[in-house]
Amino acid sequence: MTELCIEPLSRAPLYVLELWGDPKPAAKRIAKALGHDLPKAGRAHGLVLRTGPATWLVEGDLTELRAALGEGGALTPTGGGYAQVRISGPRWRSLLMEGGLFDAESAAFAVDSVVTTPIDHVTVTLRVESESACLAYVPASLADDLLRFWRISAGGLPR
Amino acid sequence: MIGPAINFTFDGRCLTARPGQTLAAALLDNGIKLIGRSFKYHRPRGILSAGVEEPNALVTVGSGGRTEPNTRATDLFVYEGMVATSQNRWPTLSSDVGAALQLVSRALPAGFYYKTFFGPPGLWLFYEKFIRRAAGLGPAPTRIDPDQYAQRAAFCDVLVVGGGPAGLLAARDAVRSGKTVILAEQDAVLAPSLLRDPQEIDGQPGSEWAAIVADEVRASGGKVLTRTSASGLWDDQFICLSEKLVEPGQVPENGFTQRYWHVRAGEVVLATGAIERPLTFANNDRPGVMLSQAVRTYVNRFGVVPGKRVVVATTGDDAYLTAQALKAAGAEVVVLDSRAAPAGQDSGLEVHNHAAPLTAIGGKYGVTRLVAEIGGDERSFDCDLIAMSGGFTPVVHLHMQAGGKLDWDEAAQAFVPGTSRWNVRSVGLAAQPSPAEAVGAAGNTKQAFVDFQNDVTVADLDLAWREGYRSVEHLKRYTTLGMATDQGKTSNMAALDRIARREGMAVPEAGLTTFRPPYTPVSLGALAGLATGEHAQPTRRPALYDLHAAKNPIWLNAGYWKRPRAYPLGSESLAQAGLREARAVRSAAGMCDVSTLAKFEVQGPDAVQFLERVCQTTAGKLAVGRGRYTFMAREDGLVFDDGTVWRLGEARYLLTSSTGGASRMETWLSYVRHKLCGDLRVSVVPVQEHYAAIAVAGPNSSAIIATLTKAEAPRHMSVVERTIAETPVLVMAASFSGERAFEVHFDASHAQTVWRAIEAAGCCPYGLEAMELLRIEKGHMVVGPDIDGRLTAEDLGLGRMVNKAGGWIGQSALHRPAFADPLRKQFVGLEALDGGSIPEGSMLVGLAGAEAEGHVTGSGLRVIEGGSIAIGHLKGGQARHGEEMWASSPTRRLKVRVRVTSPHFYDPAGERYRD
């Protein structure tokens, strides 16, 4: 595997799930529909990422989720606003330390961890896919700039 | 220092250095002692120190865009091909015309600047060119730096600043207690002091021991950074490190020349050592007068003996090590010690006690003699080097930057770190400097320099004191002491000592100046990182950016967004293109990318309650498929943004607001949602970037939309779901131009498909310039100049649209009496009476008045008929329609007679909105 691969992915339908009021009943129904609990703060499970106190990013087929949600919250399409970038290779953590203020090299930032943090002044949501890859959700309008930043930075990482 | 000789040039002279030598060491090795000229008097200057505290030996290094001025020769390691030049001299270093200033130095005392450069402001234009030429020492490069600078975050349990023995021990202890460590050392090697004063530690030669400790730090997952200076320390152990990846001016292998680290540490250990103090005597700034420990560094580390006949003048013990090193290297050495002879001491050296230097004698190439006072008698010593030691000042800069306190160490005659505000501690010489005796200035004080870099003498301090400057902060600014690039590292203590003596008080009572970052100069490039040139700020590209770019538009940076201002055809100017595009909208149909509008999906059973808190208009009365104009106020009742609200479903709304205020609105809605309305069952999601949007405007727009969607176009302020080019779209009938118009919103992933379809249907693309003309003629406000956060809805002429049921944020604030003032500024229109355009931003002044009563917020013209019009804010403006005034801009020398009108110049009844 090359040390670092920065790969923009094709756009995918993406939704924001937000629960209101007492989230527990809706969360319980959704857990049943998904086959797992909604991920806790800072975590992802399958195609669901926790991004706020009562918000998740959701990808994929929403049929069952929508049915389970009922009146407990809302699903809002948001995929057009994000570019997804996969950063893979042994040095992906090192790259994410460039221009940022989040400790991507921490062991606590393990597989299925999620964080939203500024990198080179761009607010990015990161999800650790595996020990060798991380998926970044980047605001579409800033994706070109951030890709440039990452590609240049990749050439100057400390040994 | 093994390896082939390294070739470099100094002032065009080809020289060689040995591997590992600094430029200062290499120049001394080549017999060169004259390195530069001083800032004010152009006095010849050599090398004082062997570290970052160097005030004299500043050079310009590198060439082209890699040129770096004011680089310390003592902190610059020679590399093959290095080009270094001396500074502040003309035409040559040895024959500097500016040296004539020494003849008139009596006319250039402390405060010269303040005493001379006053008078009529016009004289500044004369002074300025001389002042600018004199300022700054080395000239800044004029070409763009071709290299790159990285910025990087790092985290650790313990950050150790200083890789000397004390720092290495602290790092090792931390590693052995299971902590992650970053160790930063500004030199190119660890433990440089062990090269100066070789010794064994743990049974190992010092440098080998240092390497073993460094390996232990690395093996534990820590980092060891050399050529890395800690430039600043802030709250909660946040510290910035400036790492040189290559030497200044050197071509980097991978394009990166420096890395700026932002480190957050659990604890910071400052092993920053201490800086030796010069002695103050006449001509102590001459080439050949050096700090004692620096001399020892050159002898023991760099293999250079800077003099053969040396006088070592000292107030403490450390200088004896220098004397011994020099003697071992074959030099003749005499020691002048200010202290009494200790009983039984036999150093094997010629030592004179109760001795102090008075005057160094010599020329620009070095000293030849030292006149000293020994036990009350004067005596002269032939010498080619004077090594002086006035004690040591701990490097407490970072400790102080982090809000620490200092204690006075009487034995060392120095301030040492006291309590720390944060988890910061000092170790080694930074905490416990060597003892030294206090010695005042000797000899002619007009030639005895305290601040070498800014040419401040003891006499200058005395003059400032006589002129009443008592506060050390005032005195510093009056004399410029400690304000050069070295920030007074070698001068501040001597100055405090002098002030204290004049005041008859102890040094701690004299006060202390503020320690500010950076500790050593940081390249601006390091602070900028990769954000340079066109990337100096983030660029937000709308989804349609590529399509716009293909039309080669005139761009406008609207916030961070890159938006087309106009699409000129042929040789059209901006104004011509804008007017053509606006006329296309008035006469046929135009299309404009409005994707950057802020947009929020608001869903839930309580969405109406939420919207009616945020918006000053009603939302509950909207039927599904209808929309309305709306505006929002802060808690103070003043309008800060506007937009539209659309009911897309029973409990689903789309709220739009201004592009420029998008981030602010997102924060505001989040605050309202979570803090003010936490109990509401509502979801508020920003979808600014999810939806691209295209405005289609003009008398033909309705037919175009009908053709594209194969359905009837919605009526004004209605929204329907349709498809265009098989892409699902929301068609919202709303106008910002005064014409029948629609906003087409859709998933941004399909932006290009929809744009192409609309353009093919016969729409003329128009940019923000045309949009300005259209909206000003119609009297539509924009957030920023018109809605500037200082006016109420009533002031803006929106009072009749306010939700009378209340409940919106800011309502209670409107009961303040000030809001009933009839002379509040209000939104008005203006038309020019005598031709000429109305200057944007100009003041509105009564024809007979002199006081500004308002200002012009936007200026344009009637798109079809011509004629200059404008909109603005005017005191009591709504009651002043018909009044004539001046729109005056004195700075542009523009003055236009205007009439106050309604801001709605075009179709005030709104008939053109409807089919």
Image (tube, coloured by chain):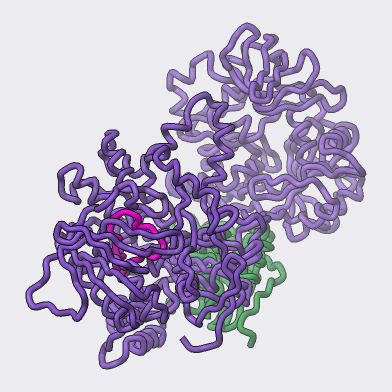
Inspect this view and state whether residue B663 appears. Answer: yes
Camera-side residue of B470 and A17: B470
Camera-side residue of B119 and B157: B119
Q: Is residue A134 left or right of residue A145?
A: left
Query: Quick one: which residue is furthest to the top in this view?
Result: B848
Q: Position of residue B260 (x, y in %)?
A: 50, 66
Q: Is residue B670 above or below residue B69?
A: above
Residue occupying image coordinates x 57% and y 22%:
B795
Q: Point out the image quarter for the C terminus of chain B.
A: top right
Residue occupying image coordinates x 77% and y 52%:
B729
Instruction: Using the rendered view, name the quadrant where residue B357 is placed.
Output: bottom left
Q: Position of residue B95 (x, y in %)?
A: 55, 55
Q: Position of residue B131 (x, y in %)?
A: 53, 41
Q: Is residue B758 left or right of residue B343?
A: right
Residue B280 colored magenta?
yes
Q: Which chain is purple?
A: B
Instruction: Using the rendered view, name the quadrant where residue A119 is placed.
Output: bottom right
Q: How many marks?
A: 0
Query: Quick one: which residue is furthest to the left in this view?
Result: B343
Residue occupying image coordinates x 56% and y 74%:
A95
Q: Is residue B627 above or below residue B796?
A: below
Q: Is residue B182 left or right of residue B905?
A: left
Query: Quick one: which residue is furthest to the bottom in this view?
Result: B203
Colour chain A is painted in? green
- The residue segment tinted magenta is B273-292
Inspect this view and state whether residue A46 appears. Answer: no
* Magenta region, main secondary structure: loop
Residue occupying image coordinates x 79% and y 25%:
B861
Q: Position of residue B723 (x, y in %)?
A: 81, 54
Residue B579 colored magenta?
no
Camera-side residue of A38 and B787: B787
